[in-house]
Image (spheres, rainbow, N blue to C red):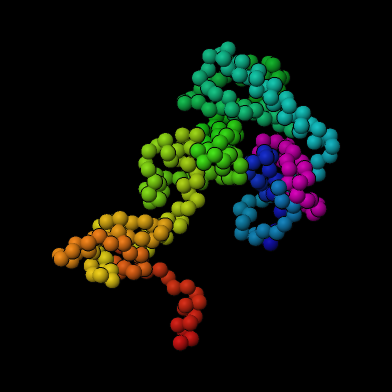
Amino acid sequence: MKKIISVRFKPTGKSYYFDPVGMAIETGQYVIVETAHGTECGEVAQGVHDVPDATITKALKPVLRIADDADIRRMKQNREDEKKAFELAEERIIKHNLDMKLIDVEYAHNRSKILFFFTADGRVDFRDLVKDLAGVFRTRIELRQIGVRDESKMLGGLGICGQPFCCSRFLKNFQPVSIKMAKEQGLSLNPTKISGSCGRLMCCLAYEQPAYEYLNKITPGLGSTVKTPDGEGTVTEVNLIAGNLRVRLDKPQDNAVRYYHRDECTYLRGGKRAPIKPAPEPEEELADNQA
């Protein structure tokens, strides 16, 4: 086990591991650390705790020190100056007639550089813009192009569910989402109904996907032939969540359509997929062994 702390640099940003180097650091404190972007001041999302050595893939950077009042004042001042820098940069973008959208601005803690995040449909020649901004701020300027999902995370907003965006509220990393998930969950494939404000597939499609994958495996699919208490029939409708099947019986005398639970039916053949038999619960296995 290795002792680490988790530090984040944005209220809803990803947490990063750092080596506390023996310091007693608690959740909610601010620390000064060395990052790939230089020296930064971050909030401790979780104080000193142990994690397995296997979870640490590379050497951790040490905490330089616990932030003092001067560090915290500088951090707050940087946040205020970022707002002014944002307004000025937008004016310069319009002046240079660049097809780009400014998203966010970040000052390095020691003010050695300023990061400007933007989105654009393609490559943008911003060399003249960088020279212009460097002449105004008298420091190093970096422009970084990001994707539309990162834009939504930075700006925030409300989703079609009425809740704040998951990415700006609690998601630390974007999960892979595919149209296959929408199909397996029986959702409409209308892009306006399964896409978020960023224009990409909604991240929440991944939340229930494991449950739907399991239910799809144990439930006879459409068109499959099953054996019911009333004889054999063909599945014409499936309700995965409730586990109900609409079955048209093969009896020539009635050819009736009836509803059954999947536990009442035995899969025989055909259909889009052959269901698997659910594994018995550990308690059931133990009881069988004892018997």
Residue displayed at 37% across by 38% down: 190
**In the image: residue 113, left or right of residue 275:** right
For the point 65% across and 20% down, the residue is: 87
Q: Position of residue 273 (x, y in %)?
A: 30, 59
Q: Is residue 28 magenta?
A: yes
Indicate whether 74 appears above or below 1: above
- From this viewpoint, is residue 270 visible? no
Q: Position of residue 267 (x, y in %)?
A: 29, 67
Q: Position of residue 106 (x, y in %)?
A: 67, 30
Determine whether 236 is above or below 193 in the image: below
Position of 132 with respect to 123 (left or right) is: right
**Image location (x, y in percent) of residue 136:** 69, 16
Vertical arrangement, residue 247 with respect to residue 158, above or below = below
Tell me: residue 78, above or below residue 187.
above
The magenta stretch is 18-44
Work out which quarter of the rendered image holds the N terminus and state it: bottom right
User: Does 194 sit left or right of 119 as displayed?
Assistant: left
Residue at 53% over, 14% down: 97
Which quadrant holds the C terminus?
Answer: bottom left
- Is any part of residue 135 visible from this angle? yes
